[in-house]
Image: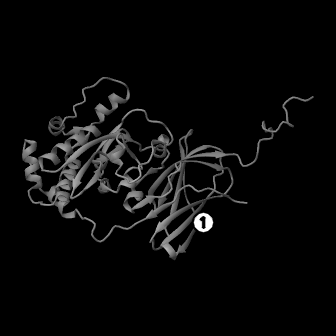
Amino acid sequence: MKKTLTILAISLAYMSAAAQSYTDVDKWVENTPIKEKKLDKVVSTLCAPFGADSLKAHAIFKWITLNIEYDMYTHQRIEVGKKTRRKQKPHQVFRRKKALNYGYALLFESMATKAGLQAVTIRGVAKSKISEIGKNQTKINHAWNAVTIGKRHALLDVAWASGGTINGKFVKNFKEYYFDTPAPKFVVNHFPKEKAWQLLDTPISYSDFKNYPIPYDAFFKNNFVLTSVSKIGRQDVMENTPSELPLILKKYAGKPRIYAVLQDTKRKKSKKTEIKKVVLAQKTDYESDTLTIELQINTLKHHEMVLSFDTVPLLGYKLKVKPSIPSRLDKSDPTKSKKKP
């Protein structure tokens, strides 16, 4: 009999036709050199062509990702416990062109305010590694923003939108999806100190947050939204036993290719495999598809698993593989003993 493992339920909601496109804004920012030495004048020049608050906010967001680099030197000194001057005030970041995540957020808030927008810096806990799933983070470790657009708040993370680190070096890699990210998706890897800034009708608990899987590009780019949040980032699976992983996709056309990359967390060895068994069952009553993939793990190890959707990383999980056959000496069985009578 198969053991069914419900790892996640997600829905795919396509963006509406009214969704904002920032292509023209990006082109303007990329192709307009601004040599002003004062932040006020930079903001004035940057936002001059735009009337809508959303366009001004995005112009500032894009400009920061292009012109500010993550301060790896300071970051690395902090990680090893060395004292360092954290020059994160807006004028310092603007002058040095380097920042930590808090500096990115403060600079966006300052520039948005100078542009006549209402913006705030939000501090909280963020997680980006599978090893962090399930762990209690006792210290604030990240900062991001909310900006008022019309009558609503838009969440954004200009630091993470700027790029990431590879082998200890910062590499620019613009991520559009970290601007005006839908709140149910943003909270998957951002937990604000003040729950009100989750911007959810029903805020989640920290316990829920720490057990979420780690979201990657495909999660945001394809508009996936988690619909089941109960400790899905940490899962126990049985060795040599096929486990079914159901997903829910709204209004999805076609049959996606699903890959799983498993890594032995002790030996640091990884293996990529395409999951051959993918069953797509149409549920026309609520315009959704139930996508079931079957995964079998043959080694008794602690694993990290990254699911990919059409080869693009989707979600990361922490797996613990348990033996499918009970030990010869089962301590729970009083009839068995190590010692002979």
Residue shown at 49% from the left, 41% from the top: 131
Above or below, comparing residue 282 to residue 143 in the picture? below
User: According to the image, what is the colour scheme of the structure?
Assistant: one colour
Instruction: Tell me if 91 is positioned left or right of 170 in this view.
Output: left
Indicate the position of residue 129 as horizontal and vertical percent values. 44, 43
Considering depth in this image, is 252 or 23 the residue closer to the camera? 252
Above or below, comparing residue 161 to residue 274 in the picture? above
Quadrant in the picture for residue 85: top left
What residue is shown with label 1?
Answer: 277
Residue shown at 36% from the left, 24% from the top: 81
Above or below, comparing residue 23 to residue 213 in the picture? below
Indicate the position of residue 118 as horizontal and vertical percent values. 19, 49
Identify the image quadrant of the C terminus. top right
Considering depth in this image, is 196 or 209 the residue closer to the camera? 196
Q: Residues within 10 Å of mark 1 (few under 14, many from 20)?
A: few
Indicate the position of residue 163 as horizontal and vertical percent values. 31, 48
Callout 1 amino acid: Lys
